[in-house]
Amino acid sequence: MKIQAIVAHPRPDSFCHALFERAVSTLRLAGHDLVIHDLYAEGFDPVLKADEAYTVGNTIEVALSKSKDPIVNLHREEIAVADGLLIAHPNWWGKPPAILAGWLDRVLVPGVAYRLHSAEGEPDGLLSIKAALILNTSDTPSEREAKVLGDPLHLIWENCVLPYCGAKSVHRQMFGAVAASDLTERQSWLAEVETVSSSTFPSDT
């Protein structure tokens, strides 16, 4: 599979990066073709520009897919031909970091990721993503995340963004609480990432 791989964490020595790197190495060993972006290391500009806002009022979206920013155009071209998506990011206030939220705003745009026939209608997802894997790190215990906070990252990735854009299958794995974990637990999580990466992106797909 051709997999777009995105990591969004400001510290390269973070456990989030370790999970991402283990997933990447697992998928490469399985023969997948990965296009990798570290948004912080590359200095991705997350701010949506006025001429990139393609919806005007309640009218049908204008089918534009080109930005004046060549980096944004590159990301759009890559995601348009990907059949797999790997994203790793921390859970900050129940949402992705701002740099990744801006990536969504600027890359998954009308004409690239989806098409609207009307303001009220269902979208046509344009991406050819067969499988997506979202890896999250958190310092909130999973029980509290689900029962008290309502698992907002589930709502973002699995209910909203990726199905809207046409992803056929979405799996999200949360690892934590990272701050309270020891070396043995982290090693078990890294092994778990190998397993989930292989099952999400089978080498014969």
Image (cartoon, grey):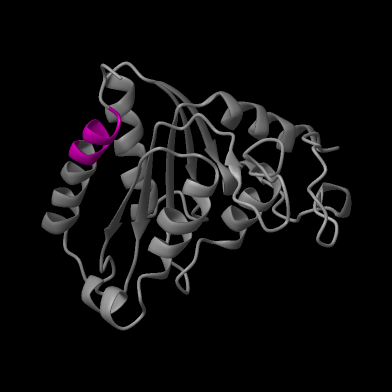
Camera-side residue of 162 and 19:
162
Residue 113, image x and y in percent?
Answer: 62, 39
User: Is residue 76 shown above or below 205?
Assistant: below
Residue 85 colored magenta? no
Q: Residue at x 43, y 58 (%)?
A: 159
Secondary structure mostly seen in magenta is: helix
In this view, the residue farthest toward the bottom is: 148
Camera-side residue of 124 and 150:
124
Find residue 151 and report its image quarter. Answer: bottom left
> Where is the C terminus found, in terms of image quarters?
top left
Residue 52, image x and y in percent?
Answer: 82, 47
Count of number-bearing discs: 0
> Is residue 204 found left or right of 66 in the rendered image?
left
Q: Residue at x 49, y 47 (%)?
A: 162
Q: Residue at x 83, y 43 (%)?
A: 62
Residue 145, image x and y in percent?
Answer: 31, 75
Residue 66, image x and y in percent?
Answer: 80, 34
Identify the magenta region.
195-201
